[in-house]
């Protein structure tokens, strides 16, 4: 089931919350394209968007984590690398096999897994750490 944006996903860092909202909106566009049977052509756009989004978003996150000495930064960065590996696999399959409905479905799965597992869980952890540090200052 496709997740909708909800304030439950707010982590309390305005720039990052705005980027997360954009990621939810993009995953919904991909889903709609797949339903409209435009998934084959949408996959190229989805991969490009996810890579551009991730490069910018991860940089923003990493600055916050470093500025606030987030103790689990190494693990968080490994997750960022894993996300790029997933995109690399999609891109490789796109170059070899061309766009397909299966590839569009995989792109959608990656976006949804990322929204659920990373934003809702992992990003919330560093947000709590940052808020705790700011409160004790």
Image: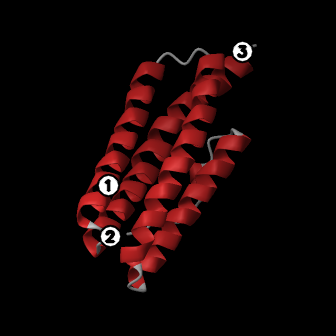
**94 to the left or right of 2:** left
Residue 3 visible in image: no
* Mark before the other along the chain sequence, 2 or 3: 2
Give the percent coordinates (x, y) of residue 36: 43, 86
Residue occupying the point 55% across, 36% down: 58
Q: Nearer the viewer, residue 55 or 28?
A: 55
Using the image, determine if residue 56 lies above or below residue 96.
Answer: above
Q: Which residue is mark 3?
A: 136
Gap in Å between the C-alphas at discs 2 and 1? 10 Å
User: What is the quadrant of the C terminus in the image?
Assistant: top right
* Residue 99, numbered label: 2
The residue under the point 59% across, 51% down is 20
Q: Is residue 137 left or right of residue 38?
A: right
Q: For marks 2 and 3, give the CA distance.
A: 51 Å
| Residue 41: quadrant of the picture | bottom left
- Which of these two is toward me, 33 or 75? 33
Q: Which dot marks residue 90? A: 1
| Secondary element at image label 3 | loop
Label 2 Cα neighbours within 10 Å, binned few <14 / some 14-19 / many ≥20: some
Number of numbered discs present? 3
Q: Residue furthest right?
A: 137
Q: Which badge, 3 or 1, is on the more N-terminal residue?
A: 1
Q: Residue at x 52, y 72 (%)?
A: 29
Packing grade of label 3 (10 A; few <14, some 14-19, many >=20) is: few
Mark closest to the chain's N terminus, 2 or 1: 1
């Amino acid at each position: 089931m496709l997740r909708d944006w909800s304030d439950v996903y707010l982590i309390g860092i305005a720039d990052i919350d705005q980027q997360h909202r954009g990621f939810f909106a993009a995953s919904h566009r991909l889903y709609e394209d797949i339903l409209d049977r435009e998934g084959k052509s949408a996959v190229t756009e989805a991969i490009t968007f996810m890579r551009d989004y991730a490069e910018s978003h991860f940089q923003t996150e990493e600055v916050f984590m470093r500025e606030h000495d987030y103790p689990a930064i190494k693990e968080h960065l490994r997750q960022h690398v894993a996300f790029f590996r997933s995109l690399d696999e999609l891109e490789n399959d796109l170059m070899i096999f061309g766009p397909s409905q299966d590839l569009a479905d995989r792109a959608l799965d990656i976006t949804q897994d990322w929204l659920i597992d990373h934003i809702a869980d992992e990003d919330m952890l560093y947000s709590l750490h940052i808020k705790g540090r700011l409160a004790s200052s």
